[in-house]
Image (cartoon, rainbow, N blue to C red):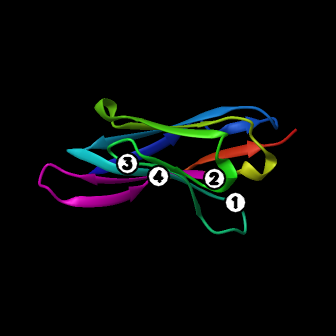
Amino acid sequence: QVQIVESGGGLVQPGGSLRLSCAASGSIFSISAVGWYRQAPGKQRELVASITSSGSTNFADSVKGRFTISRDNAKNAMYLQMNNLKPEDTALYYCNAEFRDYSGVSYNDWGQGTQVTVSS
């Protein structure tokens, strides 16, 4: 059983920063790709940023230059640093991970999400 838990969300003023964390625990042998997604009310879930096991990153155009993604493989942890936040960044942020257990079986799993609200 694997559990993915996000944390670090909250209320921040425009121009502020937040750092989201994603912790994966359980029977995990390795984590390959990790992605941060977000879903605003009335909108579809969208990819914000992703990072592969080798460290290659990809960002949505709307967050390029403001967000960075990183991971700590030893801790099975992933992070999303968000700077210069805008009201349009308000959404529920989810962590998604592709991983393999000790039996060699591959999975794709989601966390429950953490709310980010950008407002003055």
Which amino acid is tagged 4?
Gly
Q: Residue 7 is drawn in which quadrant?
A: top right
Question: Which of the labelled discs sits on residue 40, or is there none?
Answer: 1
The disc, 1 or 2, on the residue closer to the chain's N-terminal end is 1
Check if residue 104 falls in the magenta segment. Answer: yes
Residue, disc 2: 92
At mark 4, the secondary structure is strand
Distance from disc 3 to disc 2, alpha carbons, whole Å, reads: 22 Å
Distance from disc 1 to disc 2, alpha carbons, whole Å, reads: 6 Å
The disc, 4 or 3, on the residue closer to the chain's N-terminal end is 4
**In the image, 105: left or right of 76?**
left
Residue, disc 4: 35
Per the rendered image, the range of residues in magenta is: 93-110
Check if residue 90 falls in the magenta segment. Answer: no
Tell me residue 21's x, y (percent): 50, 36
Dot 2, how many residues are within 10 Å of its Cα: few (below 14), some (14-19), or many (20+)? some
At mark 1, the secondary structure is loop
CB under 8 Å between discs 1 and 2: yes
CB under 8 Å between discs 3 and 1: no
The disc, 1 or 4, on the residue closer to the chain's N-terminal end is 4
The disc, 4 or 2, on the residue closer to the chain's N-terminal end is 4
At mark 2, the secondary structure is strand
Distance from disc 4 to disc 2, alpha carbons, whole Å, reads: 14 Å
Tell me residue 75's x, y (percent): 33, 31
Q: Quadrant of the C terminus?
A: top right
- Closer-to-camera residue (113/43): 43
Residue, disc 3: 52
